């Protein structure tokens, strides 16, 4: 089955630790995105990548980092600099930068204690 | 910068009532517009989209939306809702062409009572 896989579904970390969220797609899509979903705030864009080895900051990139070394993978690292990391994180992909109909993964709920 | 406003955060309807969810965007150029839906416990999925052509677009499950360029709006409608339409609905916009990004509204949580 083609799709986007995010892992793990639930993640717990201690404050001050970096944590990396995985996102893999086998749709052969060029573009990939990371969003953060908080109640009442919708989806806010963290980072996006339109092609391999290239990525751009979204609206709330501070405290996060990404890499795009392979077309199918776009991992997100939540660093200790992120002031409020507990949230639901969604990864998405689209065919290319011109066609931004996005397909979403199931999400990762990160809890920092 | 692009932004999307959804007017209603929570909507409660009875089955068979008509639905209209407001969405306004701010961007001066040509846009692509989307409505996504998130059913309880499920991932986001596309409801309908507008790229060009007929401004009245039809999506899955009887939903439709009308693009009114002069009002920068893309409101979602359904003539008669069902209990199974209970979900959160998100409007999204991206600038067509160029190095663009997909921006979402805050979402509208719809509860349909039998």
Image: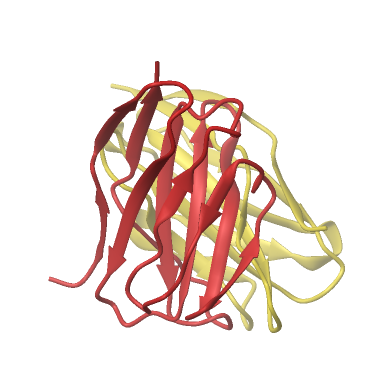
Chain colours: A red, B yellow
Instruction: Check the picture and name the quadrant holding the N terminus of chain B.
Output: bottom right
> Residue B91: horizontal and vertical position, in percent?
58, 51
Is residue A41 placed above or below A101 in the rendered structure?
above
Place residue A97 in its image quadrant: bottom right
Place residue B21 in its image quadrant: top right
Q: Nearest the camera: B18 or A32?
A: A32
- What residue sits 67% from the left and 72% below the top? B100
Q: Nearest the camera: B68 or B104?
A: B104
- What residue sits 29% from the left and 32% below the top? A11
Q: Is residue B21 left or right of residue B48?
A: right
Q: Nearest the camera: B42 or B54?
A: B42
Is residue A109 placed above or below B4 in the rendered structure?
above
Asked if residue B35 can be seen in this view, the reply is yes
- What residue sits 40% from the left and 64% below the top? A74
> Residue A67: horizontal and vertical position, in percent?
47, 65
**Which residue lies most toward the left here?**
A1
> Residue A96: horizontal and vertical position, in percent?
50, 82
Q: Is residue B54 left or right of residue A20?
A: right
Asked if residue B86 can be seen in this view, the reply is no
- What residue sits 19% from the left and 72% below the top? A2
């Amino acid at each position: 089955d083609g799709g986007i896989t995010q892992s793990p579904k639930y993640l717990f970390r201690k404050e001050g630790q970096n944590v990396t969220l995985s996102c893999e797609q086998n749709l052969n899509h060029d573009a990939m995105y990371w969003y953060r979903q908080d109640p009442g705030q919708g989806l806010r864009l963290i980072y996006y990548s339109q092609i391999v080895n290239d990525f751009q900051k979204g609206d709330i990139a501070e405290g996060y980092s990404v890499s795009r070394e392979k077309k199918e993978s776009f991992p997100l690292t939540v660093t200790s600099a992120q002031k409020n990391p507990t949230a639901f994180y969604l990864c998405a992909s689209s065919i290319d930068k011109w066609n931004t109909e996005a397909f979403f993964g199931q999400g990762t709920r990160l809890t920092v204690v | 910068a692009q932004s999307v406003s959804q007017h209603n955060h929570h909507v409660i309807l009875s089955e068979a009532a008509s639905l209209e969810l407001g969405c306004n965007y701010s961007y001066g150029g040509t846009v692509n517009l989307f409505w996504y839906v998130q059913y309880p416990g499920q991932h986001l999925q596309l409801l309908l989209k507008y790229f060009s052509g007929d401004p009245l677009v039809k999506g899955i499950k009887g939903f439709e939306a009308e693009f009114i360029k002069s009002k920068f709006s893309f409101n979602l409608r359904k003539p008669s809702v069902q209990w199974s339409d209970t979900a959160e609905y998100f409007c999204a916009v991206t600038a067509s062409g160029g190095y663009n990004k997909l921006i979402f509204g805050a979402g509208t949580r719809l509860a349909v009572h039998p």
